[in-house]
Image (cartoon, rainbow, N blue to C red):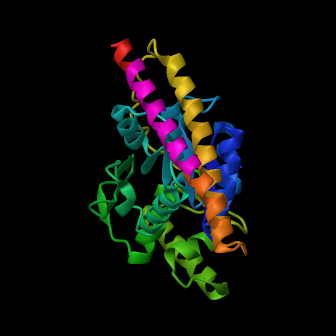
Amino acid sequence: MAKVLVVDDDPALRQALRGALGRVGFDVVVAPDARGGIDLLSTAQPDVVVLDLGLPDARGLDVVRRFHSLAGVPMLILSGSTEESRKVQALEAGADDYLDKPFGIDELGARLRALLRRSGASAADLSGGRPVRHDLGRLVVDLGARTVEVDARSVHLTPTEWRLLEELLAHPGRLLTHGWLLSRVWEDGRGEESRAALRTHVRSLRAKLQDPADRPVYVATESGAGYRWIAEMPAEPERAEPDPGPDDDTRALVHDLNNALTALQLGVHLAQGRLERSSLSEEERRSVGAPLGHLDATLARAARLAVALEHRAVAGAD
């Protein structure tokens, strides 16, 4: 079962997402702010992250960059903004997809499953336009060209060593456990024989990178647990966020309104699903289902009005 980390400051929406995603087959952990989300990245080790940009303890794009640098897992942004530029900035900062609020659980589930399918590719394939060349002084790795140089001399890696290096580079600073690496590098990686093979391949990779195990520069061993990439990665250039405009109060109100509408819509969808599986007669289902359908349509209309309100605020600011 894939694990989803939901980071959102709205309690009702967190609860609705936990219930809705749980009903469609996901294991869900939640956090109310960026700090809690960062803690869960290492302790819960999620397979995918659902992140709201309007968190109370950090600016939106800063959170995206921070999560991208720490997690190395697919990240879907929940967007309450109609501004195309904000969505583009989030994708350039490291997000993999975004979904406008309010949304249905079927679409959210489909987006997450698509991200998880894509994440089965190699780290180089998942670069999504992000830098794939890492210049670390004596060591230069180009994931796109699949080349490694140590002291300006080319080094040949086996396919398994490449997969190991890709995973380590994709998760700098993160402890990659034996079991996690075995599942990513070997499809059937189980048992002591595979674990011994993992140690052998890591030892060979270290030798080729000229990285002594007793004084590691790149790959550190966490005794009995796994391995960690410890070399400092080149910092990505900072991108300035737009200056706050005079419509910030309105945007905050629209953000809260979209959260409330999304939580209500997810609740309606859950109720409709339970109704379809209930033991009620067909006539009873219709009598209960009709008001739910009207409520769903009303929430969709309210969402359109919220979008129109934001458009008017932005136009007035210009």
Q: Residue furthest left?
A: 145
| Magenta part, dominant SS | helix
Looking at the rendering, in which quadrant would you find the C terminus?
Answer: top left
Q: Please indicate, yes or no, whether residue 266 appears anywhere in the rendered image.
A: yes
Judge from the rendering whether residue 39 lies leftward or rightward of residue 107; answer left or right: right
Seen from the viewer's position, the closer of residues 272 and 144 is 272
Seen from the viewer's position, the closer of residues 283 and 261 is 283
- Residue 7: % across, % down: 63, 44
Q: Please indicate, yes or no, whether residue 177 appears anywhere in the rendered image.
A: no
Seen from the viewer's position, the closer of residues 160 and 155 is 160
- Residue 19: % across, % down: 69, 57
Seen from the viewer's position, the closer of residues 159 and 30 is 30
Count every numbered label the image shows and give the total. Answer: 0
Q: Is residue 119 magenta?
A: no
- Residue 98: % across, % down: 44, 47
Looking at the rendering, in which quadrant would you find the N terminus?
Answer: bottom right
Judge from the rendering whether residue 121 lies leftward or rightward of residue 220; answer left or right: left
Residue 125 occupies quadrant: bottom left
Region rendered in magenta:
294-313
Residue 273 occupies quadrant: bottom right
User: Is 141 located above or below residue 184 in the figure?
Assistant: above
- Residue 99: % across, % down: 46, 47
Q: Is residue 310 magenta?
A: yes
